[in-house]
Every structure is written in structure tokens, then in C-alpha cells.
């Protein structure tokens, strides 16, 4: 796996994974560092973080297509920051994690010192163009709130840079691109 800012590599991986999810009609939402980059963060991308329900028949069919790239099966994971089920993929040295929304994923709110449910509402996703690919992204205000509660050093950097960029976008149902003014 590599940390990268190479738009071609990121775009290819994004097109590949979201293409499979869309083909099988699996709702998803791009979160984490990639979402932050779209809203103005500049740090290199470590991985592509996605939330999607992994408990449906549609996903089982999609997983068969993803199988050659899976480097971590969908298993529980608990750390200082997250308590969730996720699977990991390696697509051309781009690391992709898909968190399972059907298993009540949680994150640790360092501000209030408690675990919070990570409720992903796919109907509130924002459709944006990232690296030439139209994708569903966590809304900017929700991402800032989430990263504020995670309260890690990388989150502080992302929040600062995101807040320096005014954005305009539309919710799903209208195709809009974010842009700074």
C-alpha cells in the first residue's frame, strides 16, 4: 500500500470500487480522508474509506467480484477510535476499507469520552465528482462534526483546511460538484 496524491491512481481505484457497488445497486458513502480532500484537505491519501451495508444479497454478489482483491475479510475490529466490521481491499496498491453499516458501527468521541453510533444516512449523501468519478460522499458539515469528535491530529489538519474552503453542492437527486469560491 502506498500513501499517494497521484490523481490517476486514486481515480482508477475509485472508479473501480464505486462502479462495482453501483452495478450491484449497493448504497455507499465515501468518508474519511478522501471525502476531506474533496472539501479542501490537502494531506496525501492513505486509503479510500467507504461505508456500505455488507449484509444483503446484492453485496454477496459484489463480494464475489471483489474476492481477488480482498486482503481482509469482513470481520469485527475494535481500536481506540472505531468499533466496527470492515473488509479491506488492495486495488493496484491503493488500500480500500469498506465499513459495514448493517452492524452498528461506532467511533469513539474523544470530546465527550464516549462511543457514538456511526449512523450513515445514504439519502443525505452528496454526489460529487472526485478524480473524474461521480461518487456519493458524506456531507461536509457531517464530516467536520465526525472528525471533530474523533479528535486525532490528522482530523485537526483536515478540519482546518476544510473550513478554509467555502463549498457549494447538492444532495443526491441533483448532480453538483463542489467548488471553492
Image (spheres, rainbow, N blue to C red):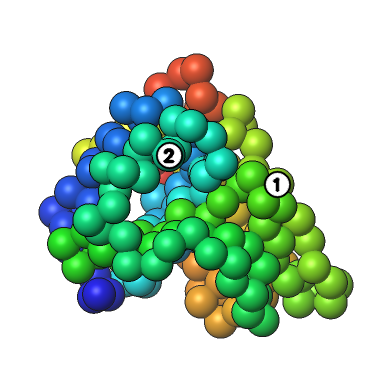
Q: Is residue 98 visible?
A: yes
Tell me if 118 is positioned left or right of 100 in this view.
right
The answer to which of marks 1 and 2 sits earlier in the sequence is 2
CA distance separating discs 1 and 2 = 22 Å
Residue 72 marker: none
Tell me if 49 is positioned left or right of 5 in this view.
right
- Within 10 Å of the Cα at label 1, are there few (<14), some (14-19), or many (20+) other Cα atoms? few
Q: Residue at x 52, y 44 (%)?
A: 54
Residue 134 to residue 149: above or below: above
Q: Is residue 36 visible?
A: no
Tell me if 160 is positioned left or right of 97 in this view.
right
Residue 95 to residue 36: above or below: below
Residue 119 marker: 1
User: Which residue is at the front of the view, 120 or 6?
Assistant: 120
Residue 60 marker: 2
Tell me if 166 is positioned left or right of 133 in this view.
right
Q: Residue at x 18, y 49 (%)?
A: 12
For numbered disc 1, what is the local secondary structure? Answer: loop
Amino acid at each position: 500500500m502506498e500513501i499517494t496524491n497521484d490523481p490517476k491512481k486514486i481515480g482508477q481505484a475509485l472508479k473501480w470500487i464505486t462502479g462495482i457497488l453501483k452495478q450491484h445497486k449497493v448504497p455507499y458513502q465515501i468518508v474519511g480522508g478522501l471525502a476531506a480532500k474533496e472539501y479542501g484537505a490537502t494531506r496525501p491519501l492513505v486509503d479510500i474509506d467507504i461505508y456500505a451495508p455488507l449484509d444483503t444479497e446484492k453485496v454477496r454478489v459484489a463480494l464475489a467480484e471483489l474476492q481477488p482483491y480482498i486482503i481482509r475479510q469482513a470481520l469485527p475490529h475494535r481500536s481506540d477510535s472505531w468499533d466496527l466490521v470492515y473488509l479491506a481491499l488492495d486495488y493496484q496498491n491503493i488500500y480500500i476499507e469498506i465499513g459495514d453499516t448493517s452492524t452498528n458501527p461506532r467511533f469513539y468521541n474523544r470530546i465527550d469520552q464516549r462511543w457514538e453510533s456511526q449512523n450513515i444516512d445514504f439519502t443525505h449523501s452528496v454526489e460529487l465528482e472526485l478524480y473524474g468519478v461521480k461518487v456519493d460522499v458524506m456531507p461536509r458539515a457531517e464530516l467536520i462534526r465526525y472528525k471533530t469528535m474523533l479528535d486525532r491530529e490528522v482530523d485537526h489538519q483536515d478540519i482546518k483546511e476544510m473550513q478554509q474552503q467555502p463549498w457549494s453542492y447538492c444532495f443526491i437527486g441533483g448532480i453538483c460538484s463542489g467548488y471553492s469560491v
